[in-house]
């Protein structure tokens, strides 16, 4: 495997330990951000489902605020792509 890396990217071969460390750091950041997003998304989804009109704990104010907030953040990636 190292021979292939040396042939394709000789500059990378000298920095291989740094490359592996950076790759590990990247995977760690992706793991943490994904975990945090999952937890917040699950909480928001449960609260929105419970407080929706005709829901278990109907609360129009909480539902409308969270609904608008979620819609705002969902649109950000599409705005960036424009």
Image (cartoon, rainbow, N blue to C red):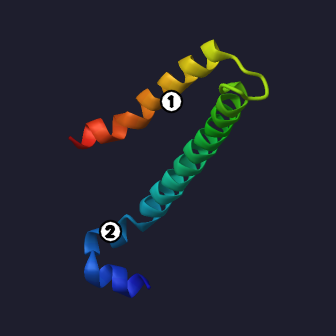
Label 2 – label 1 distance at C-alpha:
42 Å
Q: Counting other residues with Cα less than 10 Å from the Cα at mark 2, is it few (<14), some (14-19), or many (20 or more)?
A: some
Residue in the image at 36% along x and 34% along y: 76
| Badge 1 element | helix
**Where is residue 78, by image quadrant?**
top left
Q: Nearer the viewer, mark 2 or mark 1?
A: 1
**Label 1: which residue?**
70
Q: Who's the residue at 27% across and 75% down the image?
A: 10
* Direction front: furthest residue: 54
Crowd tier of the residue under label 1, counting other residues whose Cα lies within 10 Å: few below 14, some 14–19, many 20 or above:
some
| Residue 42 placement (x, y as % from top left) | 67, 39
Label number found at residue 80: none
Residue at the image point whose x is 79% and y is 28% from the top = 56
* Badge 2 element: helix
The residue at the point 48 percent across, 23 percent down is: 68
Report the label total: 2
Q: Nearer the viewer, residue 54 or 70?
A: 54
Q: Nearer the viewer, residue 37 or 32?
A: 37
Q: Are marks 2 and 1 in contact (CB under 8 Å)?
A: no
- Specify which label sits upstream in the sequence, 2 or 1: 2
Where is residue 43 drawn, in percent x and y? 69, 33
4 left or right of 18?
Answer: left
> Horizontal and vertical percent for residue 34?
57, 47
Q: Quadrant of residue 8?
A: bottom left
- Quadrant containing the C terminus is top left
Specify the quadrant of the image occupied by residue 66.
top right
**Location of mark 2 (residue):** 12
Q: Residue furthest right?
A: 56
State the residue in front, 29 or 34: 34
Percent coordinates x, y for residue 52 in the rendering: 66, 27
């Amino acid at each position: 495997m190292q021979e292939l890396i040396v042939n394709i990217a000789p500059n990378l071969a000298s920095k291989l330990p740094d490359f592996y460390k950076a790759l590990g750091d990247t995977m760690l950041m992706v793991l943490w951000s994904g975990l945090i997003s999952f937890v917040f998304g699950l909480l928001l989804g449960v609260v929105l489902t419970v407080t929706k009109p005709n829901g278990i704990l109907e609360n129009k104010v909480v539902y409308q605020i969270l609904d608008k907030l979620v819609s705002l953040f969902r649109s950000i990636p599409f705005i960036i792509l424009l």
